[in-house]
Image (tube, grey):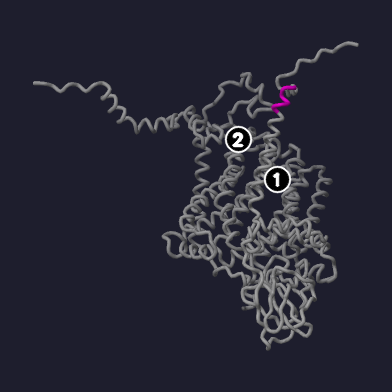
Amino acid sequence: MKTAAPPPPAMREFWENLRAAPRRIVETAFRSGKPTTDRTRSTFVFGNVFLHLHSVRTHRWSLRWTTTMGLGIASLSAFLITLVTGVLLMFYYKPYPDAAYVSMKDIHFVVPTGRFIRNIHRWAANVMVVTVILHMARAFFTASYRKPREFNWLIGMGLLVTTLALSFTGYLLPWDQLAYWAITIGANIAQSPREVTDSLGITEWFDPGGLQRLILLGSDVVGAEALIRFYLWHVMILPLALAALIAVHFWRVRKDGGLARPADADQRLGPPPGETYPIFTEAPAKTYHLAAIVRGRTPLVGRGPENTVPSMPHLFYAELGVLMLTVCLCLVLALVSDAPLKELANPAVPENPAKAPWYFLGLQELVSFSAFMGGLGIPLVVLLGLGLIPYLDREEAGSGEWFGGPGGWPLVRASIALGLGASVVVEAVAIRFGWIREWFPKAPQLIVTLVNPGTVLALIYALYSVWLVRRYNSARAGALGLFTCFLCGFLVLTVIGTYFRGPNWVFYWSPADWPGH
Amino acid sequence: MTVTPKPPGSRLDPEPVPRRDVLGLASIWSAAAALLFSLFGMLRLPKAAVLSSPSKKFRVTLPDTLPAGEALLPPGRSVAVFRDAGGVYAISTICTHLGCVVKPIPEGFECPCHGSRFAPDGSVTKGPAPVALPWRKVSGGGATWIVDEGATVPAGAKVAS
């Protein structure tokens, strides 16, 4: 009997390698294996290009619910949701006037799940605006913008502006009445420096407003050029910019030693839970040779990282939880409320009232007194003020604590009262008695531009803030008051613009009182 | 006079600029300047030399029955054409505040967006509009007139019919 010749070794090796290939692909992709020990948990984080934006271990203070309320990750989650749903919508959307509207109708009525996907996209965008604003408020009220995090605060402001720009550019794309007139108003706000150049009589030679509008629209009317430009910004330029800024923002959080926390955070947290495996079994006696090339204090010099826990699983599970909550929220909102789609854009008949998205209605309320001051002047001053906060407040007391710093919560409470009161009173005067144009019809335009309810309100807040700086002898106290006041003013103006303004931008207590058409 | 020896610098101190680095710096700055100029070139692109908007000139027929001082609104155009004893004139219906379309009313014009009001001659009477509604150029005679939405004339310049 002849036995078959054994296969040559090369062939046997080939078959074995082929059989092992799937397992080896997984092994080489995830080199560290399952994160079951502290060591593999560490390599799980720093061996992964996406996860290594986190540090390997996270301080227990950062994981407390009240430290961040998950707002940053919620913003990121909302962005990811808009990214996914936005790409899906691009399968059908056609950025050309009228065709755009028809394709929106297709998405709404014909495309399977189209309406649902569009609703999610719209709600996630709204959730993102809210969480970004709240996240900024959190970072401010916990004084987390201080050294060494100053520049990250500026990047965060860039993220806020980019988020609002994404919302604004997305608003035109349905090409319905709502979109057309909101963008007409927006483009004319871009042109509003003319309000100043006109009253100075220099528009003929120096016309930044006209140029801004022309660049924004690509034409002198809101038409095909404007739509393709807004589309380009919305699906390409701004998302890429936002993604890049997010990466820098997160990377700097890590480089700045994680989230800000009070100096006595370790004492307040108490001893770590029993099951925590200590990192240093004795006090650190290491000499930091590498520290020679690092300026300033490194986060862990002089103390052990005993109050940290592995980011995998503690931080990642928390982040996953926030992501799932955000997804749930967007799904529920998308189920209960449809994104609006009005009739086809009609350049001859303005919407009455023509309202921008809700987060711009506070600005629209200011714009109804002066286009330039409400639309550009005051927002620019507010952005400038916000950007300067970390460079003017160089104090240390209260970092990482809610309402930390001189004054604390009582000061914030008083500022809320003043912020709400002043904005309501100024608005009430303007609504009840009119403003300069009604009192002095011949008043020059420059006066009307400079002195309007918006600027008066900003001045009241600024004076109050200066008074706080003197009273508490602290820049932080002034910043606390100013930021709180502006949040309150934003809230009051937005509520008035949303609920109490009807046709011709007249004040009505309820939409039921609006005159019929 | 004693010569104090230069204290040994730390590795962390910035190094002085040696002469041979001048060439390096010059090349870096020239690269930066070149990139900056190319950026200006690219910024030139988004501003079109010719705008894609439709023609601003159009023909309009004024009916004999048009009452004096009553607005005629040519469809698809943003002007109101009037005829009275003084002649024919056209006033823009684009609000000077934020570009909404104003509506002719007996007292002048009214903007639906932010409540600006204008007198019959286009001047602002109420609301946030910063300047008066501009008058547009009209030409022609008899029943047919040519209105140029792109050309502004001083307020009050009526063309005798």
Query: Which secondary structure class fits the magenta region best?
Result: helix
Q: Label 2 is placed on what type of residue?
A: Arg
Residue at the disc numbered 1: A403
Q: Is residue A294 above or below residue A98?
A: above
Q: Chain of mark 2?
A: A
Q: Chain of mark 1?
A: A
Percent x, y of residue B109: 72, 76
Rendered residue at 53%/38% (across/down): A315
Q: Which residues are magenta?
A: B19-24
Q: Tell me the quarter of the image containing the N terminus of chain A.
A: top left
**Whether label 1 touches label 2, CB < 8 Å:** no
Percent x, y of residue A400: 67, 39
Q: Label 1 is placed on what type of residue?
A: Phe
Residue A303 image-quadrant placement: top right
Helix, strand or loop for disc 2: helix
Q: Is residue A510 above or below residue A194?
A: below
Tag on residue A254?
2
CA–CA distance between discs 1 and 2? Answer: 23 Å
Percent x, y of residue A366: 73, 62
Queried whether the magenta region covers residue A167, the answer comes back as no
Task: Return the residue found at the far left.
Answer: A1
